[in-house]
């Protein structure tokens, strides 16, 4: 694998105290499958909604952080007023008391949403969020995708893994097929061990088809500190050792880091605690 220079990546910050106010129980082992839907064709200049949806029942969760990226030359985000209208029916239908944060950047939005009713969690399927966009007047194809920073929680505990599917939008033309939902049976996996880690740890990566593969390591402030890429990764299982250093070779401080694997049109994330 080769390692290009890192950069800054937006990340919804951890909402530590809020998670502890809701739910009581450990997340299941199945993980969460979440998609941005639908992939579709829209008319130039039109307004349309996209949903973040849990596509099938999986592990229980009572909150999530997400960062959604888009091309501002193709799409303009239109926040609803009040922004609480963007919260999904799966979340609001389960609990009338929620913590909600929505932050808009030039090419992304950061979302945090958590149920504050004690003992209440959800599994899906169902809508957890929605976003409204206006298409440009120029025919083109574009994408709306999950960026590193996605994390589900249940009663203050991380719920892993999280499998994602992105959306493709065709403005005045059919949408591209490159980010259609992955073919049935597509599987990606990520394990981090040891965790917690002292000095170094290993990423065990699984992908059942060949293709580009990327691993991003992000700190809790949203900064991309290390990235590994392979444009011709073979299918199967491989192990990558991370020495706990950033792209400049500096030893990173103790703390929690988000590790995201992108392969086969899907992504999966996990967290690792580095101790010194």
Image (cartoon, helix red, strand yellow):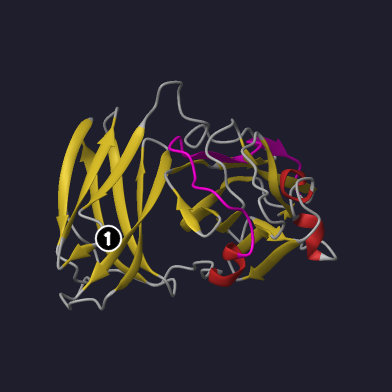
Relative height, residue 138 to residue 18 (above, below)? above
Give the quadrant of residue 219: bottom left
Q: Is residue 183 magenta?
A: no
User: In this rendering, would 20 be left or right of 239?
Assistant: right
User: In this rendering, would 237 be left or right of 214?
Assistant: left
Give the quadrant of residue 267: top left
Q: Nearer the viewer, residue 32 or 171?
A: 32
The answer to whether one can see residue 264 in this image is: yes
Q: Residue at x 37, y 52 (%)?
A: 270
The answer to whether one can see residue 110 in this image is: no
Residue 19 percent location from the top left of the image: 58, 63
Magenta-colored span: 21-44
Residue 222 percent location from the top left of the image: 44, 71
Q: Nearer the viewer, residue 134 or 185?
A: 185
Q: Is residue 30 magenta?
A: yes
Relative height, residue 223 to residue 152 (above, below)? below
Q: Residue at x 58, y 41 (%)?
A: 167
* SS at mark 1 in the image: strand
Relative height, residue 73 to residue 61 (above, below)? below
User: In this rendering, would 198 be left or right of 177?
Assistant: left
Residue 7 percent location from the top left of the image: 35, 71
Residue 59 percent location from the top left of the image: 52, 39
Q: Residue at x 53, y 70 (%)?
A: 16
Instruction: Name the image quarter holding the C terminus.
Output: bottom left
Bin the neighbour count of mark 1 within 10 Å (Cα to Cα): few under 14, some 14-19, many 20 and up: many
Residue position for label 1: 227
Q: Residue furthest top?
A: 184
Q: Residue at x 40, y 45 (%)?
A: 268
């Amino acid at each position: 694998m080769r390692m290009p220079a890192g950069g800054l990546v937006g990340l919804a910050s951890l909402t530590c105290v809020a998670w502890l106010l809701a739910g009581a129980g450990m997340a299941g082992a199945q993980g969460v499958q979440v998609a941005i839907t639908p992939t579709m064709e829209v008319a130039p200049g039109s307004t349309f909604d996209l949903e973040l949806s849990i596509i099938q029942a999986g592990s229980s969760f009572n909150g999530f952080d997400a960062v959604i990226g888009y091309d501002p030359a193709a799409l303009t985000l239109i926040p609803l007023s009040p922004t609480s209208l963007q919260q999904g029916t799966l979340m609001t239908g389960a609990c009338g008391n929620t913590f909600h944060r929505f932050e808009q950047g030039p090419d992304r939005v950061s979302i945090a949403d958590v149920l504050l009713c004690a003992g209440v969690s959800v599994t899906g399927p169902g809508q957890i969020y929605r976003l409204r966009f206006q298409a440009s007047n120029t025919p083109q194809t574009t994408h709306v995708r999950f960026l590193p920073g996605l994390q589900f929680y249940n009663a203050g505990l991380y719920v892993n893994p999280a499998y994602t599917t992105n959306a493709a939008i065709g403005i005045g033309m059919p949408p591209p097929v490159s980010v259609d939902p992955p073919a049935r049976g597509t599987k990606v996996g990520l394990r981090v061990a040891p965790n917690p880690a002292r000095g170094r740890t290993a990423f065990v990566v699984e992908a059942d088809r060949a293709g580009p593969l990327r691993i991003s390591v992000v700190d809790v402030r949203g900064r991309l500190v290390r990235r590994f890429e392979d444009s011709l990764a073979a299918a199967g299982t491989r192990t990558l050792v991370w020495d706990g250093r950033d792209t400049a070779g500096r030893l990173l401080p103790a703390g929690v880091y988000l590790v995201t694997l992108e392969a086969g049109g899907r992504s999966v994330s996990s967290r690792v605690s580095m101790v010194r």
